[in-house]
Amino acid sequence: MFILEGILYKVRESLHYVKPSEGAVAEYILQHPQKAVTMTVSELADASYASPSAVMRYSQTLGYNGFKEFKLKLSGDLAVINLHDLEQETLSSDDSIDKIMAVITNTNIQSLYSSLQLLQKDQLTAAYEYLIKAKKIDFYGVGSSLLIAHDAVQKFMRINKSCTAYSDFHMQKVSAVNLDKDDVAVAISYSGETRHIIDCVKIAQSKGAKVIAITKYADSHLSNMADAVLFVAAQEDEFRSAAMSSRIASLNVIDMLYTACAYEDYDSSLTHLNQTYEIIQQSQEEDTKRARNNKDNNRRT
């Protein structure tokens, strides 16, 4: 098993929100990561045409105590990347199915491990505690994020949590306006800027509901509005949009939240899971019996 700190992902995403002086440092690190880990603060400042203070500020912007800690984490990531050839793996039109299988799988694995490092324990704890106490949970998503919302509903309903994930935009807003202080809204948007999702969040918060965001590591509208923010990472290339790997990472976050909630009241959750399993099995048996009877009737006629 290999563990990534997600440093290069953080650096790439930081280009969207850091100051120009810090952005110059980030650009250099992305272009020359192997060199950066051997440099002093002054050397990196000179190479990136920035000031030493900009290098120090940038390290702290990413959440590290200083440049020394940043270099240590980056060095660890580069060792893992080089060992598994993760970052260098790309696809071309003449690649074999074997390579496609390997690259897609490794990319998904990298997204999962990068997301694990981006997730903050206090934020995840706050999120699942909101969900445990919630009388009703609304899941909001558009496009591939809506598929994640539907998956969440399927899971949480099986442990007796009242929840919705409407595909109709208007119904999402109608549901949001009916929330109150005892409810929770889970907004899923990789960009964190999806207008419709932001609208739903504003409505939910105006009614006193807590908001959990599942989004990319960035200073976005959604991450700034939410009461608990769960960051996910994604990799993308020419044909593989960020929605593909972010979907895997977001589903993983939903699984974490669901499992944490289920284990919080283990006996009750197990009872409800067994009841839902039995009713589904009974329904499937009835469908099978009905299909067999129809087949027999068709044969007689």
Image: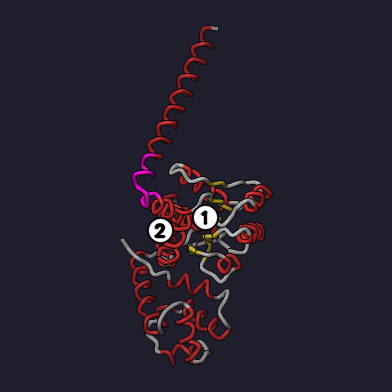
What x and y, as percent, mark residue 109?
A: 40, 58
Amino acid, disc 1: Met
Q: What is the secondary structure assignment of the residue under circle 1? A: helix
Label 1 with label 2: CB-CB less than 8 Å: no
Q: Residues within 10 Å of mark 1 (few under 14, many from 20)?
A: some
**Residue visible at 44% across and 67% down?**
118
**Residue visible at 41% across and 84% down?**
67
Residue 88 can be seen in this image: no
Q: Which residues are magenta?
A: 262-271
What x and y, as percent, mark residue 248?
A: 47, 54
What x and y, as percent, mark residue 136?
A: 53, 49
Q: Residue lying farthest right?
A: 170
* Sequence-earlier tag: 1 or 2: 2
Amino acid, disc 2: Ile
Q: Where is mark 1, residue-wise? A: 244
190 on left or right of 95:
right
Comparing 46 with 61, the one in front is 61
Residue 13 can be seen in this image: yes
**Residue visible at 42% across and 66% down?**
122
Q: Main secondary structure of the magenta part?
A: helix
Q: Where is mark 2, residue-wise? A: 109
35 on left or right of 151:
left
Indicate yes or no whether the magenta region holds residue 62: no
What x and y, as percent, mark residue 154?
A: 49, 43
Q: What is the secondary structure assignment of the residue under circle 2? A: helix
